[in-house]
Image: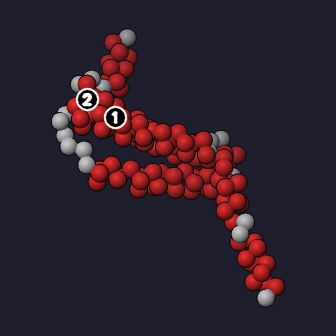
């Protein structure tokens, strides 16, 4: 009986431990979620400009995307801690994964912007660089 009581006592602290363990990833998680929400907002804007119908099914796709991105970031953080990646390679897996996710979302935001206005920001920047 003592064993079960001790086990239950330790398990009740599991959520607190998880929060403390993963708290260093909170900043990247917030930025990636903001990127997803911005992508969604620009997607809705572009769809309205194009006269497309917006339905709840397409908007519901945000939740699984956020879940996958958050789990990816948490896994990257756990890899950093477990394998000491920042000290071995000079960069953390969390940074690499969050930059990859943010890059995907930025590209999508640019595509939505181009769909709504006819002008892509990335294309303008690339063309300006090529001219110089």
Kindly identify the residue that appears in the image at 76 percent across and 73 percent down: 9
Which residue is disc 1 drawn over? 42
Q: Left or right: 14 with respect to 30?
A: right
Mark 2 and mark 1 in contact (Cβ < 8 Å)?
yes
Kindly identify the residue that appears in the image at 69 percent across and 66 percent down: 14
> Which image quadrant: the N terminus?
bottom right
> Closest to the observer: 117 or 101?
117
Q: Left or right: 117 with respect to 2?
A: left
Residue 85 in sight = no
In this view, the residue farthest toward the top is 132
Q: Position of residue 116 (x, y in %)?
A: 25, 29
> Which image quadrant: the C terminus?
top left
Q: Left or right: 51 with respect to 23?
A: left
Q: Image height check: is 118 above or below 99?
A: above
In this view, the residue farthest toward the left is 51
Which residue is disc 2 drawn over? 116
Q: Position of residue 6 (x, y in %)?
A: 79, 78
Q: Position of residue 94 (x, y in %)?
A: 58, 47
Q: Image height check: is 24 above or below 35?
A: below
Q: Quadrant of residue 44?
A: top left
- Label 2 SS: helix
Kindly identify the residue that appears in the image at 54 percent across and 51 percent down: 73
């Amino acid at each position: 009986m003592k064993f079960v009581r001790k086990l239950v006592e330790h398990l009740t602290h599991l959520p607190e431990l998880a929060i403390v363990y993963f708290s260093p990833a909170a900043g990247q998680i917030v930025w990636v979620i903001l990127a997803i929400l911005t992508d969604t907002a620009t997607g809705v804007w572009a769809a309205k400009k194009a006269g497309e119908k917006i339905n709840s099914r397409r908007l519901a796709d945000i939740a699984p995307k956020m879940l996958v991105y958050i789990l990816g970031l948490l896994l990257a953080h756990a890899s950093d801690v477990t394998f000491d990646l920042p000290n071995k390679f000079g960069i953390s897996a969390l940074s690499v994964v969050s930059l990859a996710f943010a890059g995907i979302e930025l590209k999508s935001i640019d595509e939505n912007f181009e769909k709504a206005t006819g002008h892509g920001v990335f294309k303008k920047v690339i063309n300006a660089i090529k001219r110089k």
